Image: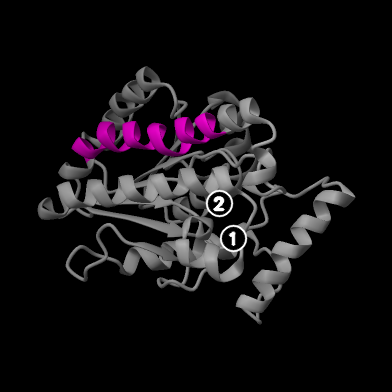
Amino acid sequence: MPSYAITGASRGIGWEFLRQISSDLNNTVIGLVRSKSATEKRVEAELPERTNIHIVEADITNYSALNAAVDETATITDGKLDYLIANAGIVSQFDAYDPIGVLGQQPEALEENLIKCFEVNVVGNIHLFNLFTPLILKGEVKKVIAISSGHASLDAISELGLEVASLYSISKAGLNTAVAKFSAQYAKEGVLFMSICPGMVDTGHFDNVTEEQMKALGAMLGAFAQYAPDFKGPSPPEAAVKDVISVFEKASVKTGDGGSFVSHYGNQQWL
């Protein structure tokens, strides 16, 4: 009876992980969310027969809440955990359409947004890993998966000329480094830590964009189309999550996947 803990499980990719993994009633699925009551209402409305879903309230930027979530998870899973899916994160709107040199014209806003990205995407996940790893060590599968982004690939930035999402990219690169460091420490104990990019996923991030913002977005999508001629735009969460699950189910420490940063294809093809 495998057990899973998924952060940011109330919506988007996190909800889709919750939905797909809980479809097997043999899986025990813990969704970590910021609003327990709202998510429980959604589960009741959309997944009413999934008695294997447990919703735990915790913001990954709140260390005390995360610590309490570990205790609650341990009660549900008899003190162990097989999979930890670190999905929760922040995608900055501030840096979504302008290059870093333009962002620098607003130094205070740049600093504020970069610190927030680091607080959530890096520091919050480091605390998450440190607090949940004792449960992972007692599990049978021992896999910790961080949801990252191809924007953090130095090769992709150079090859595609990706000017936008710089603060987000920097924070995701920091997350990838943290994952590699955790792998260096725990691979010898059989724990797989790895980062996976789900590709470009339609989660509503680009809804209600202005005409000027659409021009910047169009330039990025044009670069994506040149990089991957088969790219047709953002994929639905259902397809992206299915691909990511396939990658981490096949991955292992023994096959050298520890500390790696790969795409939803299991390689360095980001789209």
How many numbered circles are shown?
2
- Residue 69's disc is none
- Quadrant of the rendered image containing residue 112: top right
Q: Which residues are magenta?
A: 114-135
Q: Are marks 1 and 2 in contact (CB under 8 Å)?
A: yes
Residue 238 circle label: 1
The correct choice, above or below, for 219 with respect to 104 in the image is below
The quarter of the rendered structure image containing the C terminus is bottom right
Label located before the other in sequence (1 or 2): 2
Q: Residue at x 55, y 71 (%)?
A: 159
For the point 46% across and 30% down, the residue is 119
Q: Secondary structure at mark 2?
A: helix
Residue 119 in magenta stretch: yes
For the rendered model, the colour scheme is one colour
Between the residue at mark 1 and the residue at mark 2, the CA separation in whole angstroms equals 6 Å
- Image coords of residue 186 (percent x, y): 16, 48
Label placed on residue 16: 2
Residue 31 x %, y % = 45, 38
